[in-house]
Image (tube, rainbow, N blue to C red):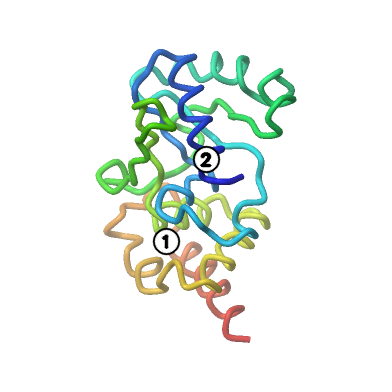
Amino acid sequence: MQRSELEHIIRASGDVAKDDEIVIIGSQSILGQFPDAPMRLLSSMEADVYPNHHPELADRVDAAIGEGSSFHELHGYYAQGVGPETAVLPSGWKHRVIVVKNENTNGIAGLCLEVHDLAISKFVAGRYKDLEFIQELIRHEMIQKRSCELDWPRRNCRKQNVAELVRRSRRCFRTKNQ
C-alpha cells in the first residue's frame, strides 16, 4: 500500500461513517510517520481502521470498502473495519498519533499510530508476521531499542507480562545484529 492509497481509504472511510477522524491501527499506520516507508513494510493491501467518533460503525466501513467489496476489486486495496479493542495500545497513544489530513483525504483526519506505539502493539500481538514487521523497523532504524524496552512501564503495557515483551524485543534486536 502506498501513502496515496491510505489517504483514499481515510477519505472513503470518513465518507461511509460520516466521521471526520479515522483511526488507523494496523501496520499501514506506518505511512503516517513514514510516507515513503520501505516496501517490505507496505506489503499489506489492507488498512485496519475505525471511525474515531463512531467506532460502532466500523462494520459499515468494512461492508462498503472492505475485503471483497467493489472498492477492493476496483482499487486492489481495502479497509478492514475493526474496533478500538482490536489492538492493545499503550497509555497515551492518542496524544502521539501522526495526523494525515490533506486535500487527498478531503479534510478527514487519519490518526496513525506513532512508530513506537505501533511496534509495541506488534510486540504484544507477538505473531510471526508482527515480529518480522518489527525486525524490518529495526533494520531500517525506524525504532530505537531504548524506546521499545524502557518505555513498557511508561507506556503502561499492563495487559501483558512486561518480562515477556522485553524478551521478544531483545530477540528482535539481537536478530538485527547477527
Q: Are marks 2 and 1 in contact (CB under 8 Å)?
A: no
Horizontal and vertical percent position of residue 141? 47, 73
Q: For mark 2, does the 10 Å Cα neighbourhood hold few (<14), some (14 to 19), or many (20 or more) residues?
A: few
Secondary structure of residue under mark 1: helix
- Which quarter of the image is occupied by the C terminus? bottom right
Horizontal and vertical percent position of residue 94? 30, 41
Amino acid carrying label 1: it is: Val
Pointer 2 residue: 4
Pointer 1 residue: 162
Taking 121 as reference, is 114 left or right? left
Is residue 93 depicted above or below 62 in this figure? below
Secondary structure of residue under mark 2: helix
- Which quarter of the image is occupied by the N terminus? top right
Horizontal and vertical percent position of residue 67? 69, 26
User: Image quadrant of residue 55?
Assistant: top left
Q: Residue 125 or 27: which is nearer the viewer?
A: 27
Please identify the residue farthest to the bottom as the structure is shown. 178
Amino acid carrying label 2: it is: Ser
Taking 95 as reference, is 126 left or right? right
Residue shown at 71% from the left, 25% from the top: 74
